[in-house]
Amino acid sequence: MNLHRSDKKPQWERTAESERTVWQRIAHKTHGIVTPANLVSLTGLALTMSGLQDFKKGNKQRATAKIILGRACDIADGLVAEHTKTKSPLGEAVDATVDKISMAHGLYVLSETDTLPVVTTASFFTQNIVNTAATAIAKKRGVELHPSAEGKITTLLQWAAIGGYVIDSALHDQNKDSDTMSNTALGSHVVTAGATVLGAVVNAQYMRTALQTPSQIQTRNF
């Protein structure tokens, strides 16, 4: 899995100025703010937020399409950053922040509309809070934490489960047969269980690294 993960220095800083691509030059001049990957990340955030608003208003089919496209951008941004050689600490931070905002708002809106089971909301919310706390602790103690494949897969599973519940709600509004709705909901329950188990492993990885003693501190790719 191609992760949106960077070293301390942006990629363009390791490339001779005369050999930098157009995107690397733009990234350098804007201190890493304007990059293709950041544009993809922010586009994904905008689509997800817009989709959630549509869902809240009852436009569930349009909402589902926007949310799927928005979360697809979360997968694409790392690929774009790698392809354009514009990975940077700022880009990694933007990606992580977009993930947290999207998840927090998604859980809020879908809980408010009774779309998500209470257990699912509590599980995903708790896991994201633990990861955020671990990142803050690590930063304060000078430990570097980066997204891992397991972390990205957990996020993917969480959104797959959320997407299943959203689709189930949309089918219910269209008066589809109960078997289809039950199968969709059942699938979401199973994915939720998987995300919860893997998410617990990722939580442990983050916290174990964040709480290292000074003599143990080193860069960990989580």
Image (spheres, rainbow, N blue to C red):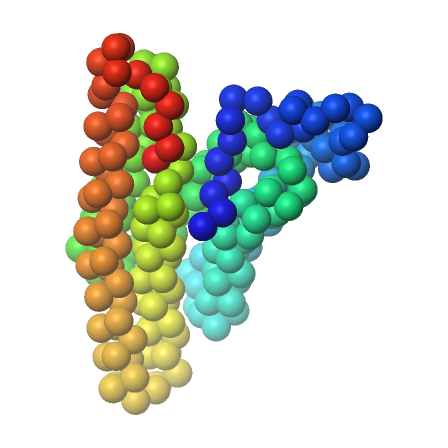
User: Can you give x and y, in whole percent of width and height, for residue 20 in the image?
Assistant: 76, 31
Count of numbered labels shown in the rendering? 0
Residue 35 vertical placement versus 29 (above, below): below
Residue occupying the point 25% across, 79% down? 183
Residue 166 vertical placement versus 89 (above, below): below
Residue 47 vertical placement versus 21 (above, below): below
Relative depth, front residue between 69 and 205: 205
Relative depth, front residue between 133 and 19: 19
Please state, as top left, top right, bottom left or bottom right, where the C terminus lies in the image: top left
User: Can you give x and y, in whole percent of width and height, for residue 30 in the image?
Assistant: 71, 26
**In which quadrant of the rendered view does residue 52 lie?**
bottom left
Return the residue found at the far right: 18
Residue occupying the point 36% across, 79% down? 171
User: Can you give x and y, in whole percent of width and height, for residue 218 in the image?
Assistant: 34, 19
User: Is residue 20 in view from this perspective?
Assistant: yes
Return the residue found at the far top: 214
